[in-house]
Image (tube, rainbow, N blue to C red):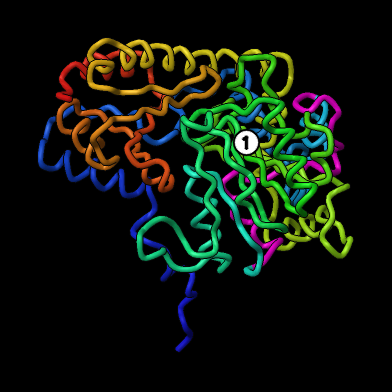
């Protein structure tokens, strides 16, 4: 018989979000009729904007005509969409040849590990989006969970905590490592400054590292002094790949459309082109994003689409303010609860002293009928925290905030 991929046997427990779903389901079965509100998984809730939805609808209907039918397209994505992303979102800082369209950021983050193989060293922010770590374990770039439960063998964890303003000590990162970095960060919500990202780029260039920069929440940045892309930093094109998505700004979590930026200047140790290898990955392991979804992406980046995306992001950021006002209230302050939110992210990162993350998750579910996300699921440094997500209808978020008064701390 064929042996199992050891990477899967090295994974601990279940993936974070299915575990949340399991606990929610079990609670609902024990308490039939309970009205559970989710402020947990970062899934968008508001309808697609009319302009973007119409563009996809028109394209789909045209497929039923000889003139409008389209089959396979370029695996790298529609030329027009690649050009528009380069022009509209990056203001010419990248070339269309460096833009690769995909079926979402999570898929790209998983696929991109094929560029580096199992022998690469990996460093991740702690806490971090689980796919950075779990994907590394599956491909064999990391080993088993350490005996003390502090992380997987072979992965360097870079704690991002209140004491360092959620920006890590880079000196722990070995030379020639892949560095997974997310800003605005999921789950902490921290948005790194230009000075901080400059330090990251300079460290990577000096030590032969490649940054995998997850910018999926870039459009939530409202502070004009904060960088939206790593390519605002001089030298980044020599050491960074950026991953991005239409999921959050355009509501494409189910539509599935994202992109990666792999600069032509980025090289492996032997001088070969990372861009060319990524092109090979995309043309060999991927058959291109949906043509219908790409039509929606084009509409999202025209004048009307950009206006509609801003409106929906403003809607979610209003939820951040609503939750922040309650969680920063006197009741929670008296209990020592600390709320971390910059207003440049859809997440609030909240510390509950005296509680383990899963314990406070269960307590909020049982006493408030509200689902949040336990911080420990994002890494060791997340213990004691929970993530509150702003993705929800205003009325549900307002109701959840009223229920927080039932929480006994």
Closer to us: 313 or 269: 269
Question: What residue is at 33 percent from the left and 59 percent from the top?
Answer: 13
- Element assignment for label 1: strand
Question: What residue is at 56 percent from the left and 49 percent from the top?
Answer: 124
125 on left or right of 62: left
Residue 282 among magenta residues = no
Quadrant of image for the N terminus: bottom left
x, y percent for residue 357: 29, 40
Closer to us: 65 or 117: 117
Closer to us: 65 or 279: 279
Closer to us: 289 or 306: 306
Question: What residue is at 84 percent from the left and 55 percent from the top?
Answer: 267
Q: Which residues are magenta?
A: 88-117
In the picture of the structure, the residue carrying the numbered disc 1 is 245
Query: In the rendered image, which quarter is residue 45 located in?
Result: top left
Quadrant of image for the C terminus: top left
């Amino acid at each position: 018989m064929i042996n199992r991929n050891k990477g899967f046997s090295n994974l601990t427990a279940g993936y974070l979000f299915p575990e949340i779903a399991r606990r929610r389901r079990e609670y609902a079965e024990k308490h039939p009729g309970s009205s559970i509100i989710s402020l947990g998984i970062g899934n968008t809730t508001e309808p697609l904007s009319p302009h973007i939805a119409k563009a996809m609808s028109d394209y789909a209907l045209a497929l039923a005509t000889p003139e409008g039918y389209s089959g396979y397209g370029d695996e790298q994505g529609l030329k027009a969409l690649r050009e528009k992303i380069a022009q509209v979102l990056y203001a010419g800082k990248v070339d269309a040849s460096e833009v690769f369209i995909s079926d979402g950021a999570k898929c790209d983050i998983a696929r991109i590990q094929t560029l580096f193989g199992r022998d690469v060293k990996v460093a991740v922010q702690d806490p971090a989006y689980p796919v950075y770590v779990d994907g590394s374990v599956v491909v064999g770039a990391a080993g088993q969970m350490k005996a003390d439960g502090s992380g997987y063998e072979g992965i360097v964890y870079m704690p991002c905590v209140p004491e360092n303003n959620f920006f890590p000590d880079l000196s722990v990162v070995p030379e020639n490592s892949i560095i997974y970095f997310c800003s605005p960060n999921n789950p902490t919500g921290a948005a790194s400054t230009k000075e901080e990202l400059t330090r990251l780029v300079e460290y990577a260039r000096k030590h032969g590292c490649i940054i995998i920069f997850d910018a999926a929440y870039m459009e939530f940045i409202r502070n004009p002094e904060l960088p939206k892309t790593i390519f605002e930093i001089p030298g980044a094109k020599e050491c960074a790949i950026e991953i991005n998505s239409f999921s959050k700004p355009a509501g494409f979590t189910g539509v599935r459309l994202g992109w990666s930026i792999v600069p032509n200047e980025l090289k492996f140790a032997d001088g070969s082109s990372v861009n060319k290898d990524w092109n090979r990955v995309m043309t060999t392991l991927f058959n291109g994003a949906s043509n219908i979804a790409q039509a929606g992406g084009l509409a999202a980046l025209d004048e009307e689409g950009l206006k509609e995306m801003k409106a929906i992001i403003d809607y979610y950021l209003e939820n951040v303010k609503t939750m922040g006002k309650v969680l920063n209230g006197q009741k929670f302050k008296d209990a020592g609860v600390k709320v971390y939110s910059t207003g440049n992210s859809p997440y609030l990162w909240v510390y509950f002293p005296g509680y383990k993350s899963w314990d406070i998750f269960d307590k909020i579910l049982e006493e408030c009928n509200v689902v949040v996300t336990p911080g420990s699921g994002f890494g060791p440094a997340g213990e004691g925290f929970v993530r509150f997500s702003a993705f929800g209808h205003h009325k549900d978020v307002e109701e959840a905030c009223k229920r927080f008064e039932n929480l006994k701390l």
